[in-house]
Amino acid sequence: MKKIFFYFVSISVIIFSGILFSNTSLLGLIFIIFIGLYRGSATGSTIGFFLGLTDGIFASSTFGVLSFSYAVVGYVTGRLPGRIDEENPLAQIIIVFIGVIFSKLISIILEMIFTGNKGILGIGWEFIFVIFVPLFFTIFKKWWLLWFEKLTVER
């Protein structure tokens, strides 16, 4: 029950920051990648689905596109921990960089399939935040440790 409440509060904070500061969906994507890396593919895809669902509602995109995109990113990053060092800041930056591109590509492809609109891969300003990913990961770790006694990687 404590984990469910933790995820609910975390998602609420990310949604609230998305309402206050538009275009902060990258924070949610970084959180999805963090949860995927540290808690596994099932938790990463579940959190990705719910964050994508709410992000899709506020972004007024085609219903379900962002939820599917974020769920796939959460699942894929959840499959990585045995192959990489998730504590390495350079690895964190590279994983989030690839995760953002992967999420955007999935979203654009699904938008073209369902609506016929040709999307533009607009990812310019978001890469500035990718440099600060180790800081966000540290904040997320402290947030986790505030709720729970330890942060173990589920492999």
Image (cartoon, rainbow, N blue to C red):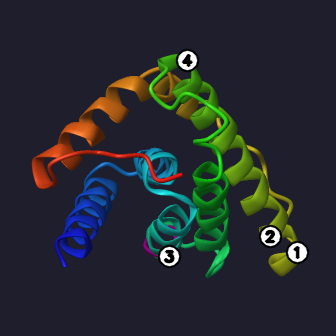
Q: Which residue: 45% across, 67% down?
A: 47
Q: Which residue: 19% across, 79% down?
A: 1
Secondary structure under tag 3 reads helix
Between residues 43 and 111, which one lies in front from this camera angle?
Answer: 43
Q: Quadrant of residue 64?
A: bottom right
Callout 2 amino acid = Leu
Secondary structure under tag 4 reads helix
Cα–Cα gap, marks 4 and 3: 29 Å
Between residues 55 and 137, which one lies in front from this camera angle?
Answer: 137
Q: Pointer 4: residues within 10 angstroms few (<14), some, or many (20+)? A: few
Q: Which residue is mark 1?
A: 113
Q: Which residue is mark 4?
A: 90
Callout 1 amino acid = Ile
Q: Which residue is mark 2?
A: 110
In magenta, the rendered stretch is: 52-56
Left/right placement of residue 57 relative to residue 8 reads right
User: As displayed, is residue 68 above or below residue 74?
Assistant: below
Mark 3 and mark 1 lie on one chain; the one further toward the N terminus is 3
Q: Which residue: 16% across, 71% down?
A: 2
Secondary structure under tag 1 reads helix
Cα–Cα gap, marks 3 and 2: 15 Å
- Magenta: main secondary structure: helix
Cα–Cα gap, marks 3 and 1: 19 Å
Secondary structure under tag 2 reads helix
Cα–Cα gap, marks 1 and 2: 5 Å
Q: Is residue 107 magenta?
A: no
Mark 1 and mark 4 lie on one chain; the one further toward the N terminus is 4
Mark 2 and mark 4 lie on one chain; the one further toward the N terminus is 4
Residue 144: percent from left, percent from top: 22, 48
